[in-house]
Amino acid sequence: MSMRPDPYKYFRVEARELLDQLVQGALSLEKGVFAPELVPKLLRLAHTLKGAARVVKQVEIAEFAHAVEEALVPLRDQAKPFSQELARHAFELLDAIEERLKHLEPPREAESEPAPRPPADELLRTVRVDIGEMDALLDGILEANTQLGSVRRALGTLERARGVADLLLAQLASPRTRGAEGQPDLGPAARTSAWAEELRAEIVALDRQLTSSADQLERELRQVRQRAEQLRLLPANAVFASLERTARDVAQTAGKRVAFETKGGEARLDAHVLATIHGALVQVVRNAVAHGIETEAERTQAGKPTAGRVLVEVARVGNRVAFRCQDDGRGVDLEAVRRAAQKKGILSKDTEHLRLDELVQLLLKGGLTTARTVSEMSGRGIGLDVVRDAASRLGAEVTLKTEAGRGSALEIVVPISLSSLDALMVEVAGMTTAIPLDAVRGAFHIRTADAARLAGADSIVYEGNALPFLPLAYPLREKVSPGHNGGPGVAVVVGTDSELAAIGVDRLVGIMNVVMRPLPRVAPVDPVVAGAALDAEGNPQIIVDPAVVVGMARRGDRPASAPEVPRAAPVLVVDDSLTTRMLEQSILESAGYQVDCAVSGEEALEKARQRQYALFLVDIEMPGMDGFTFVEQTRADPFLREIPSILVTSRSSAEDRRRGQAVGARAYIAKSEFDQAHLLRTIRTLVGNNQ
């Protein structure tokens, strides 16, 4: 039986987005922020919500939205202050709308079907994108289509050139005729020369036109891909409004004053991460206000400002992102934690004297509460259970730091699935690598006279200070070669917190916005690698972790001299799966092999005819030419027939294995039986004589 259509699917998303903006605006008004355009904007939002509710026949929501309009109109007409009474009334109306939205759940045909996802999750999964970003994406697509038109016109030139070539070949194939007196007739020779000149001119024009069009098309498509990747991500501040509302409501209920602050909201992250972490952050903020922030009287007595401070910060840390909630309250009462643990029987006499950090870990395990009474806000000991559950689902780490009378800071560090960042692209030993731009403090050319000395130096002078110096090729395990392209090389100054270091690169490529992807968990990579981005052809580019690089430079973690890393014969990995390409490339490069990648059999053949390879590692199922055909064609090519091929595929039937053997593959490895050690042994067996 098919499921009935959900009549409120798009209304819920739109209504919650409008509601979120209304809440954010009401919070700004309550804090005294009274920009001239704020109230008219809120009136438009309420009016839009009212109209949308009437369309789907949600009369109550429409009436509440109309009541919000009526409450805000006096502020527009008379510029009245947003009094506490008006704020309370506005938030009651917004809460009533939120309550009605909770009842508009998607229908379920059977009890066995899972319950609908929570409202915040749905809002983060279905997002209305920024019009400016969408316009930029559409402009890029339009420009790419324009460039494709230029390429098609160039193909017309190619057709004419081919016609001239046909005439030239026909002329060369015809027997030479002679004149009446037996002398050679120079007419055909003259015509052949003219056609050759015409052909040359056509080819030159074609080459120029196609090169220009291809370069422009590549730039446009790269921008389109970057825009599309941005639309896949959400700014972290998408969850800030509900967190501020939580702090405000808990503070009012508890009779406290709180100044809520945020930082790092511009970071764009995967919506799944934000949706999962949102509920945990709500609990953390609630705990900070309910348990951490003191009453006004207590803060005055302690010499603190009457309003407590709660800061929610989002920061990128290498290949992870940290969500941090910090308050300036009383700190965690660890003695109360000890008493609560003893009351529940968690602590025995042998463990009564736990250290501070051990008590903190005990609290993070959940199930404990230091509240004397159970209230709507606290007292059941489940707040940190929510945090722990979210951390478990995301593979996150949770830490808590607290100081009596100074406050607490709880941090949830989550592995990044997708994240957007600006990066400085540099070239190291012929490889393009990305350094997060927020860690770059400067860059300067290394003088030619200093290049050789710096290969073994520990420091370099920058603005009058000696900084630790490390060629980036060392942690990347590349051959160190300052001035790789014949120039003097460049030192990039990288900083984390208060520590600085200089890293040597061959040259600066430029600044790009990239989407960082994590490497597969099974890929053996060095800690210096934070993740990878994709270039215009879909090949991975390393993104380094600035903190790791700075740490290595300051500790002097590098060889005493510039080592020559032995390079085995190059291997060509052919697979349309990004994950598989990255995994196989990482395994092979860690074993010392040079690796090139291709995403199709056609591209692989083109690369194979341009460079001598020792081995082809080929997937079978690819768009266009499949792996079987690729192996057949290489075996039929006199220049490629001696290069062995290994088929690595998800197809494991006996028939496929027999066909792989028939076309000439030297080995067949099923992905379901993939073993890194076995792969490397097979490769060493096949290319041992070619290294």
Image (spheres, rainbow, N blue to C red):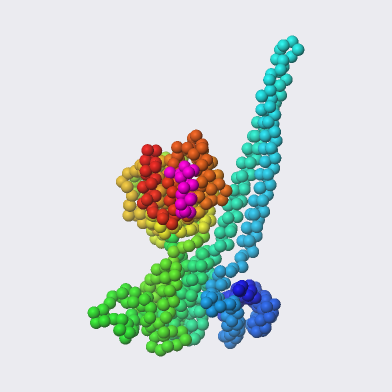
Residue visible at 60% across and 79% down? Answer: 104
Residue visible at 38% across and 81% down? Answer: 367
Residue 662: say if magenta: yes
Q: Residue 539, position in %: x, y? A: 50, 50
Above or below for 185 versus 492: above
Q: Residue 312, position in %: x, y? A: 47, 72
Seen as rendered, the residue at the extreme right is 180
Of the 4 image quadrants, the one containing the N terminus is bottom right
Residue 619: say if magenta: no
Q: Residue 156, position in %: x, y? A: 70, 40
Above or below for 451 versus 402: above
Lateral position of residue 345 relative to residue 228, left or right: left
Of the 4 image quadrants, the one containing the C terminus is top left
Above or below for 616 versus 333: above
Q: Residue 127, position in %: x, y? A: 59, 68
Looking at this view, is 135 or 164 the one in front?
A: 164
Seen as rendered, the residue at the extreme bottom is 373
Q: Which residues are magenta?
A: 651-666
Above or below for 353 versus 274: below
Location of residue 302 (image quadrant): bottom left
Looking at this view, is 33 or 320 the one in front?
A: 320
Seen as rendered, the residue at the extreme left is 350
Lateral position of residue 111 relative to residue 439, left or right: right
Looking at this view, is 479 or 389 the one in front?
A: 389
Does any portion of residue 461 appear in the rendered image? no
Residue visible at 42% across and 81% down? Answer: 382
Residue visible at 70% across and 33% down? Answer: 163
